[in-house]
Image (cartoon, rainbow, N blue to C red):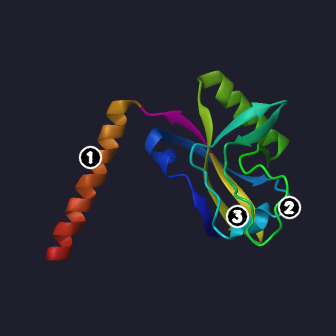
């Protein structure tokens, strides 16, 4: 599986509880643009609208080799999951105050998929703790390289 876009802030700002694989409804040359690694999930989130999951603020720029038409790179895109998975996500989100975020876009057997996760927001002290852990692991790796 080739990763096409990754949301770096997702793992820093949120604690990932469960992850799901979803298809994404794309139009026109968005597929070519995503396969050219030009998509961005920075600031993207998933919302519920009429019992459907909608990806909001995912930036997919216009494909360069096509003539320009009316194209909105930040439009809302429908996520494709089984009805049972959608119902469980909706139930868990509303019952416990969790959020649904996209983690990465990837290619699986020729189709573009989105990994979405049910997540809980981290507090400031949790973020400081993860920064400290990351710096400690870097220092350990540096020390191991010296020996």
Q: Name the residue that disc number 1 marks.
A: 132
Earlier sequence position, callout 1 versus callout 3: 3
Q: In which quarter of the image is the N terminus?
A: bottom right
Q: Residue 34 carries which label?
A: 3
Residue 46, relative to residue 62: is it above or below? above
For label 3, the crowd category at 10 Å Cα-Cα, with few meaning under 14, some 14 to 19 and many 20 or more, is many
Q: Which residue is depicted at the point 64% across and 63% down?
A: 38
Report crowding for label 2: few under 14, some 14 to 19, many 20 or more residues within 10 A (C-alpha): few
- Check contact, mark 2 vs mark 1: CB within 8 A: no
* The stretch drawn in magenta includes residue 60: no
Stretch of the chain drawn in magenta: 117-122
Give the spatial CA distance, label 2 vs label 1: 44 Å
Count of marks placed on residues: 3
Q: Is residue 19 left or right of residue 12?
A: right
Classed neighbour count for the residue bearing mark 1: other residues with Cα under 10 Å, few (<14), some (14–19), many (≥20) = few
User: SS at mark 3?
Assistant: helix
37 vs 140, nearest the viewer: 37
Q: Which residue is drawn at 75% across and 32% down?
A: 48
Mark 1, secondary structure of its residue = helix
- Disc 2 designates what residue? 28
């Amino acid at each position: 599986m080739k990763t096409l876009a990754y949301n770096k802030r997702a793992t820093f700002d949120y604690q990932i509880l469960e992850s799901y694989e979803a298809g994404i409804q794309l139009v026109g040359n968005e597929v070519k643009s995503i396969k050219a690694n030009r998509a961005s999930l920075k600031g993207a989130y998933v919302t519920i609208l009429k019992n459907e999951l909608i990806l909001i603020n995912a930036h997919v720029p216009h494909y360069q080799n096509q003539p320009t038409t009316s194209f909105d790179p930040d439009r809302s895109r429908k996520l494709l999951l089984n009805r049972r998975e959608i119902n469980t996500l909706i139930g868990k989100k509303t019952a416990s105050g969790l959020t649904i975020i996209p983690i990465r876009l990837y290619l699986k057997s020729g189709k573009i998929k989105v990994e979405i996760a049910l997540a809980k927001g981290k507090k400031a002290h949790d973020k400081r703790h993860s920064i400290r852990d990351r710096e400690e692991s870097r220092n350990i790796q540096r020390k191991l390289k010296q020996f």
